[in-house]
Image (cartoon, helix red, strand yellow):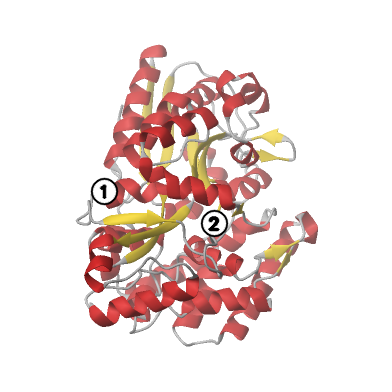
Amino acid sequence: MKLPALSQALGSVRARGTSFTAAAATLLLAALTATACAPGTSGGTATGDEKSGTLRVWLFQEVNNKPKEQVVEQAVTAFEQRHAGTEVEVEYIPVETRAQRVKAAFNDPRSAPDLIEYGNTDTAGYVQDGGLADVTAEFAAWPEAKDADPTAKRSVTVDGKVYGAPLFVGVRALYYRTDVFRELGLTVPRTQAELVATAKKIHRARPELYGIAVGGAYTYGALPFVWAAGGELATGEGPDTRAAIDSEAARRGITTYTSLFGDDNCPAAKCAQMGGNATVTAFASGKAAMAIGGDFSHAAVEAGTVKGRYAVVPLPGATPGSIAPAFAGGNNLGVLRSTSHRTLAVDLMKSLAGKDTQAKLFDAMGFLPTYTDVRADAARRKPFVKPFTDTLAAGTRFVPASAGWGRIDSSLVLPTMFQEIVSGRKDVRTATEDAAGKMNAAFTSAG
């Protein structure tokens, strides 16, 4: 198995976490905003179905990627042994630059991979743009697929057709430093108001720490605050989808989240540009007393300096004892429509997303399996799963059911909104109105 050089464009930024300067961030944001959009319609269709040769795979690069690489290598080695004359090349790409990479792949099939990992929020957009192969028949004939949970199956389904295989389900919860809480005599927050107060209390007592690491570019860490306040991203479906981020309820949640940016917790100059990986890195490296992280962040935190000194609870909601609705995240694997190795690519997809590999990815990375039986076994073996399964059980939310969401996400509409607020460039009302306008334009153009 060959592993080409990993992309370094954002890897060093993610490793440095809070050392990412505002100037560099501004340049990166401008570049992404200018170039990131949903991939154009693919003109590439398979011209054959070769049964040997080289298959190229793009997977996402994690904060601590080595354990993932090891699991993937095992699956790939077994695949290559089953298929004589076949070689697999795996490249790990930064999540933040996936829009540009995938757009290029859809528009230039000659340089495209055969198989990609993609976020479940990208499914509808990638299908509309003609990039993913319809694997409905193969998925239906796959014995393991019958044990995939309904939410995971929906994440690869558009208009009744299947465009990939679920790889893992992801939800976020609250990581906190047990030693810091014990030292300061603090109790775990039961509401989001208590969370804000606790974070600021920690920073006053320990100014070298963020009370809670938050990021202006951390969309899926911010949305539980919107949902807990009764807000929504949008209403309606398909061509009738309209933005709701400018509703009064949504603004209440946004106000709560953005109140965590400032010199009393997480200074905007450092935190406005941080994304989810940067906040987890800050926590894992001992620079924050709390962070909102996923089950998929577990391996990175365990590899950090806080190992043995943290715990995880569901992120609290607006009222005592409630759990904030979490984004029903997760990643999928999809075969590109342009592949000339369709049969091999589908088989490799099944190998990488199968029960055996998902169980190993859980042990290595903390990724929650999409199979109900494999997930139940994981929960029995690893107690750290409970806060995340409790969060799943409390109810999750998803992004609008419109291909326009991919354009909204890749154009950084919501991160820009949060950054405008925390920097003081716009107030909450103006920023949300402007964001809603951009969202509605994307929904309308998607049809």
Mark toward the start of the polypeptide (1 vs 2): 1
* Quadrant position of residue 263: bottom left
- The residue singled out by tag 2 in the image is 326
Q: Residue at x 68, y 74 (%)?
A: 437
Crowd band around label 1 with a 10 angstrom C-alpha radius: few (<14), some (14–19), many (20+): some
- Can residue 135 be seen here? The reply is yes
Note whether 321 is above or below 379 in the view shown.
below
Viewer-proximal residue among 189 and 4: 189
Q: Residue at x 58, y 52 (%)?
A: 394
Question: Would you say 277 lies left or right of 204 here?
Answer: right
Question: In what quadrant of the picture does the N terminus appear?
Answer: top left
Viewer-proximal residue among 409 and 206: 206
* Mark 2, secondary structure of its residue: strand
**Residue type at mark 2?**
Ala
Marks 1 and 2, Cα distance to the nearest angstrom? Answer: 22 Å
Q: Position of residue 64 (x, y in %)?
A: 29, 47
Q: Position of residue 326 (x, y in %)?
A: 54, 56
- The residue singled out by tag 1 in the image is 302
Residue most extreme to the right? 240
